[in-house]
Image (spheres, rainbow, N blue to C red):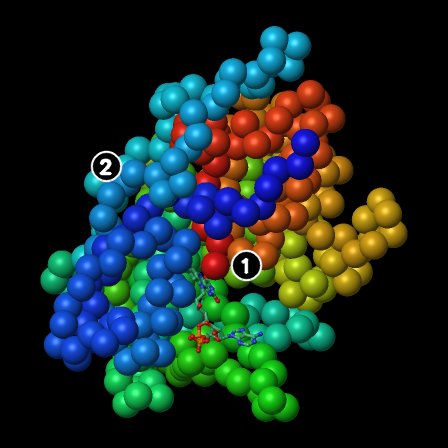
Amino acid sequence: MRVSTATSSCSDSRVFTVVVQGYGVAQPRTAERSINVPFSRLQSLMQSISQLGGKVISVTPASDAAVAPATPAAAAPAEKPAPKAPAKPAAAVHHANVPVNLYKPKNPFVGTVTENYSLLAEGAIGRVNHITFDLSGGDPQLHYVEGQSIGIIPDGEDANGKPHKLRLYSIASTRHGDNMAGNTVSLCVRQLQYEKDGETINGVCSTFLCDIEPGAKVKITGPVGKEMLLPEDEDANVIMLATGTGIAPMRTYLRRMFEPAEREKNGWQFKGKAWLFMGAPTTANLLYDADFEHYQSQYPDNFRYTKAISREQQNAKGGRMYIQDRVSENADEIFAMIENPKTHVYMCGLRGMEPGIDEAMSAAAAAKGLDWAELRPQLKKAERWHVETY
Ligand SMILES: Cc1cc2nc3c(=O)[nH]c(=O)nc-3n(C[C@H](O)[C@H](O)[C@H](O)COP(=O)(O)OP(=O)(O)OC[C@H]3O[C@@H](n4cnc5c(N)ncnc54)[C@H](O)[C@@H]3O)c2cc1C
């Protein structure tokens, strides 16, 4: 009854057209070609182009069609009725008026860093910063909505002496920005660091961002992304599964739902149930934890916050507590919520989290006589299963 995780990287439906120069075997440096690529492979294509000395001319959305065609859900056996996921329920996310690609790599917006501070407490593993950019003065004004991403082009050149390519980052602020003035964007960035041949390698863009000082100018592209948009329905239910910096879009949703200044300004009063599952290695690595605790204390009927702290908590088998263990523990309630067509599930973080979540959902579904391999495509088709992993 387990769901194969082989298709999990295809769970995002967007397709982008990348126009690239001088990329590919025996391609002359001036030859241009268009490559259609699913969102899940966009980042690795960019890296490959960069490594092979190609030049990205443009990145544009190619289509809203699904990459991994949502397999038409086979009818469930009569004795095991799967919860019906309506094709386009009232709860479907609206995509109208969502800004996309206001600034492209050829002509990026230049923002100014206003703040850059660590989100981690004493004793945490690694480095994760909250970084805010002033977006004033653009024509057009760079604006965005909750759930989108922006691109950052780090200063400097790659090993081939070419300007660095953009990296995508999920936006961590609401459309109003942290200062509520509507002219900033914030990110939550983990510095990539790994060991290779006895040497510590620092990720180019994440290190550039974590080190950046207020006042510095940064090239910004986008916004992009329609996969992680919130439903407009105030009665929707929102289940959030986040690990690490995957909390960024969830922070935007929760601020929009529960931050007093946001509620006052956005004319949208969330009345449904929001449930955040957050995975982190240590308590010191929890991001925006005090804000979420506060929202839970202020809105106990509307917000639930469940943490999986792998190096400090144990699962039922005595192993480390990961987010999928919390999903398993709460499977009955999660599935009861999912049966409601107004419930949306959002997953964000490192791609490695997907197999564990899939496994937990498969086991939980099986315990209820359901087949997750059938149910998940139905939810995806109904625009209720939203995944952005990287
Ligand atoms: C839609 C989307 C949203 C994102 N949102 C965020 C976000 O909110 N916050 C955030 O921090 N990141 C986010 N990312 C990831 C981000 O785009 C960058 O990939 C990340 O910051 C690393 O970029 P870098 O330039 O620092 O690393 P690079 O210098 O580009 O290095 C990355 C490369 O290093 C190599 N590498 C990595 N790890 C290892 C290893 N262990 N051993 C050997 N080689 C290795 C791989 O070749 C990899 O491609 C997001 C990505 C996407 C696609």
Residue 385 pos. (x, y %): 48, 36
Q: Is residue 163 above or below residue 256?
A: below
Residue 117 pos. (x, y %): 50, 74
Q: Amino acid at mark 2?
A: Ala
Q: Is mark 2 within 8 Å of ligand 1?
A: no
- Residue 309 can be seen, yes or no: yes
Q: Earlier in the sequence, mark 2 or mark 1?
A: 2
Residue for badge 1? 350
- In the image, is 371 to the left or to the right of 201? right
Q: Is mark 1 within 8 Å of ligand 1?
A: no
Q: Is residue 282 above or below residue 247?
A: below
Q: Hey, which quadrant is residue 155 in on the image?
A: bottom left
* SS at circle 2: loop
**At 42% across and 80% down in the image, what residue appears?**
204
Tell me if mark 1 has few (under 14), some (14-19) or many (20+) residues whose alpha carbon lies within 10 angstroms of its own.
some
Which is closer to the viewer, label 2 or label 1? 1
Q: Are marks 2 and 1 in contact (CB under 8 Å)?
A: no
Count how many numbered circles sit on residues in the image.
Answer: 2
Q: Amino acid at mark 1?
A: Leu
**At 64% across and 23% down in the image, what residue appears?**
370
Cα distance in 3D space between marks 2 and 1? 29 Å
Query: Closest to the observer: 161 or 92?
Result: 161
Q: Hey, which quadrant is residue 79 in on the image?
A: top right
Query: Closest to the observer: 202 or 45?
Result: 45
Tell me if mark 2 has few (under 14), some (14-19) or many (20+) residues whose alpha carbon lies within 10 angstroms of its own.
few
Residue for badge 2? 96
* SS at circle 1: loop
- In the image, is 146 to the left or to the right of 311? left
